Image (cartoon, helix red, strand yellow):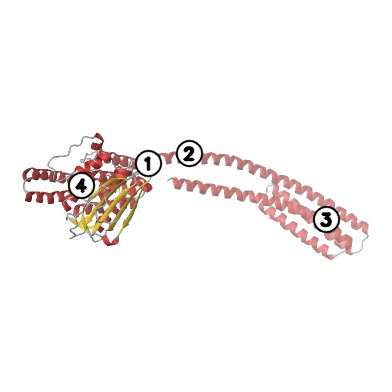
Amino acid sequence: MIIVLMAVMNIASVFWTATYYHQLSGKLENQVELHKVSINFLTLLETLSNYISSGNSNYKEDVTEILGNVAADIQLLQKGSTYHSPLYYQLSDLTNMVNSVTDKINHLYLDYSGGLPRIYIRDQMNSIERHVGYIENELAKINTTYMENLQQFYSGFSRTMINVIRLSIGIILLLVLISILIASKFASSVSQPIHTLATTMLAFGRGDLDASIEPIKTNDEIAILIDSFNSMGSRIKRLVNSIQEKAKIEQQLKLKEIENQETLRLLKESELALLQSQINPHFLFNTLNTISAIAQLEEAPQTNQLICNLSTLLRYNLKNQNEMVMLEQEIVAVRSYMNIQQMRYGDKISYIEYIDPETFGELVPSMLLQPLIENSIKHGLEPLARKGKVELHINKLANGVIRIIVRDNGRGIEQEVIDYLNSLSMFNTEELTVTSEALKQKKPLGMYNVLRRLELSYGEKPIIIKRLQPEGTECIINLPLKGNETQLTLPVDGIPVGSSQ
């Protein structure tokens, strides 16, 4: 509607401008033609005088041409004037006067060629000059008439211009009001579902797994995002309930069969399967919040890419229930996770890989790398205002060991957290008592799962966690290759005996 109104106003303005421009051009052309007539009469007298003085016939031809131009110009002016108007009659009188002058000039030619005395010729020349003077006076009157008409035209044009300006201002104000109303309604239709989605996500992130959003009947990206959130929330709720049930079963197995070695072996396998199926709800909630923020800033393709990366992680976590997976699968999962985080943090966090391609086919415990990198981002880089980076180094040592290093330049892990992780053991029958209030808030669940998974797979914890100076954290994992019976002895500085840097 706004475009149509603006188009109508522009077309009307162009039409009105073209009409007045055409009228003004016609009036100015009349003024120019009248001025040409006046100039021609001045030239006529000078040319006629030259003819009388020299008798050159070329001057006579020039006089004839000038009279023809004058007659044509006067006829054009008369044609453009209103019939039976005062101007029309003035131009008719001017035509008669020009004809009279033409007759006198022709009579002069006859007397001049007949050899009459110069005094008679001069007398006829004076008579022609007087008639030309009368014509000049008549031209002045006609010019005055044109100027009066132009003044009347300009007065009408000024009044019309004022009315057009007022009408344009009124239309513009009306369009502004309509635009405000439309923009307000459109903004409300967009912002209200987004606000509802953000509020529900916050509640979901605080642990309300029953939080959901009423679907909206639109076909835009917001409706798709709401449907995806509801579907994701239902799946997460079922998964959390499943994890809680498995946790209860695990606790019962521990209490009933703790003294039986065969039962302990079965318990290890059960716990490994449980730990492999766990998903960090905090990461999922942050990812969903990131999707919400990006949906407000960018179009659907980028949101779709973000969801694809999340789906890759979920599929990997849910389907890889085997005890060991290829290292290449772990690296692909890490890249999907970092794509999500870099979409969330932008250039605040950079990710660098230094990986030996020969290690891609080696078998490692599933979900080994992603929790370590998530721990670096969440506890090391996220609280900082500056930019940070995470590095992943994987290479094969000469003694048949795969060395994995996850390093960041964040704020660094606290020593009490390192002591806590070193104290954990799946063979303890009592829960470790956490006395530090700070440690209760920063209990690294992801790192705990990695430690338990390494214990289940290798019977020990082949991992060293260090705080770097002046800042940062480094986790070093030394895994024997499949079929390699090398026993790892970990010294104080974190480098296994018999290995090379």
| Position of the C terminus by quadrant | bottom left
The label on residue 266 is: none
Residue drawn where x is 48% and y is 48% of the image: 7
Q: Which residue carries the number 2 mark?
A: 173
Q: Position of residue 126 (x, y in %)?
A: 87, 53
Mark 3 or 1, which is nearer the eye?
A: 1
Of the two numbered discs 1 and 2 on the same chain, state the one appearing first in sequence: 2
Give the SS element for disc 3. helix
The residue lying toward the viewer, choosing from 403 and 369, is 403
Q: Which residue carries the number 3 mark?
A: 45
Of the two numbered discs 2 and 3 on the same chain, state the one appearing first in sequence: 3
Check contact, mark 1 vs mark 2: CB within 8 A.
Answer: no
Amino acid on which the number 1 mark rests in the picture = Ala
Give the SS element for disc 4. helix
Residue 217 appearing in the image: no
Residue 347 appearing in the image: yes
Amino acid on which the number 3 mark rests in the picture = Leu
Rendering quarter of residue 202 = top left
Of the two numbered discs 4 and 2 on the same chain, state the one appearing first in sequence: 2
Q: Which residue carries the number 4 mark?
A: 449
Q: CA distance from mark 1 to mark 4?
A: 29 Å
Q: CA distance from mark 3 to mark 1?
A: 94 Å
Q: Position of residue 128 (x, y in %)?
A: 84, 54
